[in-house]
Image (tube, rainbow, N blue to C red):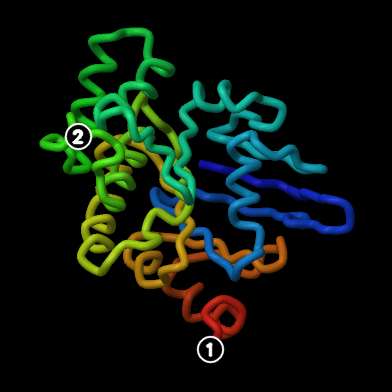
Amino acid sequence: MIKIDTLTVQFGGIKPLDDLDAQFVAPICGLIGPNGAGKTTLLNVLSGFVRPTKGAILLNNALLLGLSPRRRVSLGLRRTFQQELVVDELTAMENVQAIADHVSRDRAVARREVGLALDFVGLSDRRNTLGRQLNLFERRMVEIAKTLIGRPTVILMDEPGAGLNESETERLRRLLVEIPSKFNTQLVLIDHDADLIASVCIETLVLDFGKRLAMGPTRAVLNDPVVRRAYLGRE
């Protein structure tokens, strides 16, 4: 569970996050809003890359603010980015193994976790393929596999469906809904695909100009007229 209390981020006169209060409790939570709403800023604060002006964040009752990104990883926080961070000169397996080398002290456990992660995302037969030879969907799967290493407690995903075609998005959807039960972890998902959010997220937070516009069961949130005007651009 993630609890956010009066979180504010300010850069000069701009507040990407403005007195935000929210709790992510469900196994899969959505985070949506128009461009510039503060979604990625929130993930950056949770990850430890941006220091807030004020506020507090609890991850399973542990205070996050003040902890380094590395310490947050040790607490089980994982993250994907809008741009895949796949090393072209390493194989799919080596890309995932590089994460295991940093979060696990037991090499046998690390090898087993890497194999399970690659199998889960459907890349077992591509494990020895260089990063530069992987297509967009496969690179995205490598990124997800990396988050599954080392007993994650919360995985933050920033637009994992961006650029995928319809069949790839459906494969992604089936994979996402399995993660909480299979890996005992919570997902917080940013994506502009409202259909993907609706199909996988149990509850959703909507941001607008850094403020909480709505939060609750995903279907109800997406049907809220205020949300439809601000985020979906229709009545």
Q: Is residue 230 above or below residue 16?
A: below
Q: Is residue 178 above or below residue 215?
A: above
Q: Are marks 1 and 2 in contact (CB under 8 Å)?
A: no
Q: Quadrant of residue 55?
A: top right
Helix, strand, or loop for circle 1?
Answer: loop
Residue type (three-letter) at the residue carrying disc 2:
Thr
Q: Quadrant of residue 159?
A: bottom left
Compared across the picture, whether 25 is left or right of 131 comes to right
Residue at 64% across, 34% down: 48
Which residue is denoted by mark 2 in the rendering? 129
Q: Quadrant of the C terminus?
A: bottom right
Residue at 61% across, 79% down: 230
Which residue is denoted by mark 1 in the rendering? 234
Compared across the picture, whether 28 is left or right of 20 comes to left
Number of numbered discs: 2
Helix, strand, or loop for circle 2?
Answer: loop
